[in-house]
Image (tube, rainbow, N blue to C red):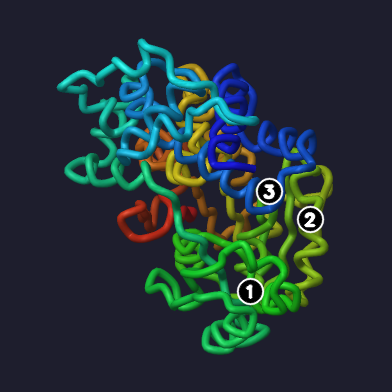
Amino acid sequence: MTPSARVAAAITILDTIIAGEPAEKTLTNWARSNRYAGSGDRAAVRDHVYDALRCRRSYGALGGADSGRCLMIGAIRSVNGPLEILFSGEGYGADPLTVEEKKFTAPPEMDEAVILDCPDWLVPLLKDSLGNDYNKILSCLQSRAPLFLRVNSRAGSREDALAALAVNGIGAVPHNLSPTAIMVTEFPRRVQNSAAYRDGLVEIQDAASQALVDLLPLENGDRVLDFCAGGGGKSLAMSAQADVEITAYDLDFRRMRDLPARADRANVVIKTLRSTGELAVGSFDFVLCDVPCSGSGSWRRSPDGKWSLNRDSLSELCKSQIEILEAAKYYVSVEGTLAYATCSLLAQENSQQSEKFVMNNPDWELNFEKQFTPLDGGDGFYIALLTRV
């Protein structure tokens, strides 16, 4: 594909996403329908799409409207790129610029929310949540997140992992957020075909997610319940941290479909459950609730979530989060710990939820909480540890 054809493909995909389709699903469908596109083409188109979604408001302002075409025009204008070459209309390329598009100039002054690519309704919530770091964090969310790996300490050291990755030409360096964290600096797309990954020496996991698990007070012999396990990344990290017996559950069992294979690769045993009916009250020393949330801490990776979130969906998420905590508390042993975690930057989903739970349950107390933000290097995460009084 020519550079212009890649831009044209990105325009089509962006229009579909703007119409309401999930970004990842749309990209997958496009790749399946366009088998002629090589791996380099698919990667370039994906980068165009995700860059445009991260900067949807500012690129739209530079391009003249919130459409796939205008977003790509804005993206190219933002770096003073060769607009008329990329919009040449040749072959399968994007149609040539219209007279109006050539004449269009961005407004001399743009609102702060436009410059920072933030929905208007979220500005006060994020300012209240992030304080003086609001501008820095929102600016950080406009750029691509690094790829982080977690070293499986049961399989080797961080030095072992760096050496193994280097054999496949993958550049990587240690990251200070966690003793197990590695940041990939060169050829990230080679990771999943590398021997280090296939042999279970490394797993893909954000550095802040690893740091969150580092804070969990796990002891050898603990019975652990991962109550919202999803793909099982934190289950795998916990299994490497201590000799614990892990049970994973998710309301949507299909989300855990890859966990058995991942556990085999890591050489650990993780039991998966289809129903809470299989859980006994008070039978776990540690229960982790990594609840469904806005995902605002990971908007660098999933930027379409920033634009699909609204007041009603945030309210429903907050309601669900408290319901999950209330359900999970019954599985915690008398002297056990209940952990509440999100990948959110919003206080409404984080500290306010911990406070609400303690207020509604005076026999519980908050022992510890911490907020990670992209300024720490990884995604935004929140963790709270709760115990009975």
Identify the residue shown where x is 38% and y is 57%. Answer: 367
Q: Is residue 388 above or below residue 308?
A: below
Q: Residue at x 47, y 64 (%)?
A: 207
Provide residue 62's location: percent of width, then percent of height. 31, 25
For label 2, the crowd category at 10 Å Cα-Cα, with few meaning under 14, some 14 to 19 and many 20 or more, is few
Q: Which residue is mark 2?
A: 258
**Which mark is on residue 230?**
3
Q: Which mark is residue 163?
A: none
User: Across the whole image, how many numbered discs are drawn on residues?
Assistant: 3
Horizontal and vertical percent for residue 38? 71, 50
The circle drawn on residue 202 is 1
**Image position of 39 (left or right of 208):** right
User: What amino acid does circle 1 point to?
Assistant: Val
How packed mark 3 is, by other alpha carbons closer than 10 Å (few <14, some 14-19, many 20 or more), is: many
Q: Which badge, 2 or 3, is on the more N-terminal residue?
A: 3
What kind of residue is marked 3? Gly
- In which quadrant of the rendered view does residue 323 lie? top right
In screen coordinates, is 195 left or right of 334? right
State the SS at label 3. loop
